[in-house]
Amino acid sequence: MKLGIVALTLATLAVPARAQDTGMKLMGLVMRCPAISSDGKHVALYSMAGSTEPGSKTSLAVFSAAGKLEQRIGVVPPATDAAKAEAAATKIVKLLDDGGYKRMSRVARASEDRQKLTYSTKLTSEDVELEVVVKNRKVTITGTRAGTALAPVTVKLGAKDGTCKKAEAYDLANTQAGYDPKTQLFAFSVQAEEARSVCGAHDFVVTLRAP
């Protein structure tokens, strides 16, 4: 379990019961994501990045199937403002329920190599095998599907690493990634770390196609 999720869990302790209930609801939302809508046109990720909402530390990011960010619902920690946290959690639950969102196929990690700001990991899901490399603020994805090579995909990290003063490492949490075999969409977050804590995230939805 990643530090960002641990922090979310700890934030529900030693606080009023209402905040604890909201924290558990948010944990449930983390487990539901990444999720794809019933029409296959939208993907929702629970991100360790905040939004423009003052005080938000995490958020739900909704992408189109083309990989364009359409909306981001910021979540203020329950221990900071229980009312705002509850309102955001309720809004997110409604969005996922109304859109018929279902959890994407889970992603397993085969290996990873962390070299400060250069990071690589090998992942598997369904019949897909991937290698994801983060280097020079670019993310490159190569791999195969049922033994057939996929076209390489390259995306760029945003200009800022969240609230990090200076990111010390990057990471991809496989438990917060998902793959949909029907649409071939791959959803994931590259998390930025400082002092061994997650302080930002870059969220992506890409299509894995054969050349």
Image: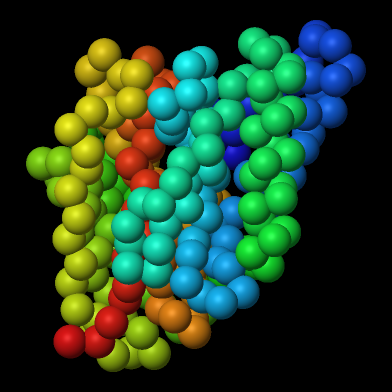
Q: Is residue 110 at all visible to an observer of this figure?
A: no
Task: Report whether 158 appears left or right of 127.
Answer: left
Residue 145 position in % (x across, y down)? 36, 84
Q: Is residue 60 at all visible to an observer of this figure?
A: yes
Query: Quarter of the image containing the C terminus?
Result: bottom left
Task: Report whether 99 appears left or right of 173.
Answer: right
Task: Report whether 192 appears left or right of 14.
Answer: left
Task: Report whether 143 appears left or right of 23.
Answer: left
Residue drawn at 67 percent across, 13 percent down: 81
Q: Furthest residue to the left?
A: 136
The relative height of residue 55 versus residue 33 in the rendered view (above or below) is above
Residue 1 position in % (x across, y down)? 59, 39
The relative height of residue 66 versus residue 90 in the rendered view (above or below) is below
The relative height of residue 50 versus residue 47 in the rendered view (above or below) is above
70 or 183: nearer the viewer: 70
Residue drawn at 27 percent across, 51 percent down: 120
55 or 155: nearer the viewer: 55
The relative height of residue 155 versus residue 30 in the rendered view (above or below) is below
Quarter location, residue 12: top right
Residue drawn at 31 percent across, 76 percent down: 208
88 or 208: nearer the viewer: 88
Residue drawn at 22 percent across, 42 percent down: 157
- Judging from the image, the colouring scheme is rainbow
Residue 83 position in % (x across, y down)? 73, 19
Residue 125 position in % (x across, y down)? 49, 72
